[in-house]
Amino acid sequence: MLDDKIILENSKKLDVLYVEDDTALLNATSELLQLYFHRVESVSDGEKALVAYKEYYKANAKYYDIVISDIKIPKLDGIALTQKIKAMNAEQSLIFITAFNDFDYLNAAIELGVDGFLQKPLEVEKFKKTLHTTSQKIVDKMMMHEHYAQIEATNIEHIDLITAKEFSVAEDILADLETHKEHISHTWCAIPLVVERLEGHEIDVEYFRSNFAIKVIEYFLGVIRAKNEAGNCPVVFIMLDYFKHKDLPLHDIFMICVHFKNTVTSYIFSRYRFNQELFDDVSLILDRNFEGVIRNYLNLKGCTKVETAKNSLSQTPSQEAEDEEEEHITSYVDYVLEHDVYELQDLEEDIDTISIKVTDKNRVSVDDIVVLGSSIKRYGTILSNYHLFSKLGMKIILLGDNFQENAPLLFENEEKRMNIATLLEGFVNDLITWRREIFDNNIENPHFLDDSFFSNVDTIIMFIEYDENSVVDENESMDDAEFFDF
């Protein structure tokens, strides 16, 4: 049973026009609607409804939030009324009340884009569920429009503003991204983890895709074309405040952003041989925006870094078994042997140094790549010795194994080696940030970057294993199988 408090949280902000020619039903349903909505006006036929709709707009400079109408009403039936209303306000939310024999009307209503249908006699639970779903969509849309207005009225300065003037432009790739941006947005929003995070907080995935995901991609393309500034996307600010309203934890936002980055890079990777300059630029833009998203969300939440980590980061079921041990850890410096902490720091420098070396074809050797893999494995091995960090450690060991097993292939393929070195550099920077937060700042949740690390390791392994001969022809049709699996 749907709790009335959940419905009222949104519905009490909305005004409703109700149309019904049966006087008894009109009065009874009006009383019920008045329990849920801010204002309810009831009329008995289509012509009166149209007059009331126009008068409300004149008086309030906005249209009714919802129109609820029987399909078969006098003077102007529900379909004709809807056509006239939609001509004035294409985004009007409408709910039809129908009888079992209204099939001809129903087909016409569906074509007009009605938001919901209720059958006579009204079932209270279904009635409440329809009100809740429709109200939620309307309030979400209202909030989005309000924030667009705020952003247009205020000069918002982003901490990660960078100029895009010097970015390279590969017109063939950009044209492809522009053509397939809908497909890319669908791919991003179909990733199971993204769906899980959104639906877990009652966010409609298609609503998120059409109102946020596709617009983020469009802005991103504008940055590469040097028309927009990286890190200053208005949609991102609206999206963050929307997430705040939905009380999404930082952990979930982190993963949604990570998969946007992975989706875009994987799309380019699946379609083209790399343009190194473009790839570097794309990675920089995505990383800068990604960092800005997290920091801006912290600002919106009004928390310090440690407070946010404590209060906002969600715990997965797999972490529940670790809680008892974590509660007894007052300092991770005490938990991890001192010489292991120093070795982690040394290994980060070694990995970073070798990563730079492998980009120089005149200096690198197969043995260098094997040593790189060995250093990565050693880093993972140290972490895996501690229960709290064992999953992260095993994932990093897997990455090291991959470098060692594919060392000859990477040595022969300079382009692949260069691309992977770029990705690895970013991964090492994240490791350094993680280690400092754990051992210098003693952050409350030691798992705050785990999912991001796992996703980045999978991306690097994907690059290592990618077969250039499998690049699809530009003229071939795409399907979901051509994208990498996340």
Image (spheres, rainbow, N blue to C red):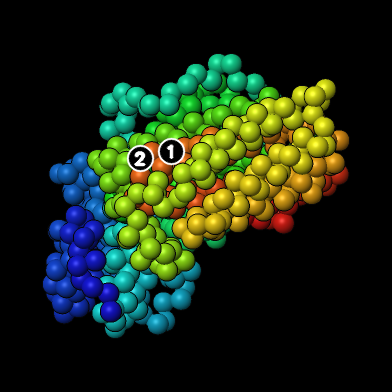
Residue appearing at x 55%, y 16% in the figure: 165
Residue appearing at x 84%, y 42% in the figure: 409
Q: Is residue 243 above or below residue 279?
A: below
Which quarter of the picture shows residue 180? top right
Q: Is residue 334 visible?
A: yes
Which of 310/442 is in front? 442
Which quarter of the picture shows residue 475? top right
Give the residue type at disc 2. Asn
The image shows residue 200 at horizontal and vertical percentages of 40, 63
Residue appearing at x 83%, y 22% in the figure: 362
Distance from the alpha carbon under mark 2 to that under mark 1: 7 Å
Q: Are marks 2 and 1 in contact (CB under 8 Å)?
A: yes
Give the residue type at disc 1. Arg
Mark 2: few, some, or many residues within 10 Å (few <14, many ≥20)?
few
Quarter placement of the C terminus: bottom right
The image shows residue 93 at horizontal and vertical percentages of 33, 57
Mark 1: few, some, or many residues within 10 Å (few <14, many ≥20)?
some
Q: Which residue is mark 2?
A: 441
Q: Is residue 271 visible?
A: no
Residue 436 tag number: 1
Secondary structure of the residue carrying tag 1 is helix
The image shows residue 262 at horizontal and vertical percentages of 60, 45
Quarter placement of the N terminus: bottom left
Residue appearing at x 52%, y 45% in the figure: 340
Q: Earlier in the sequence, mark 2 or mark 1?
A: 1
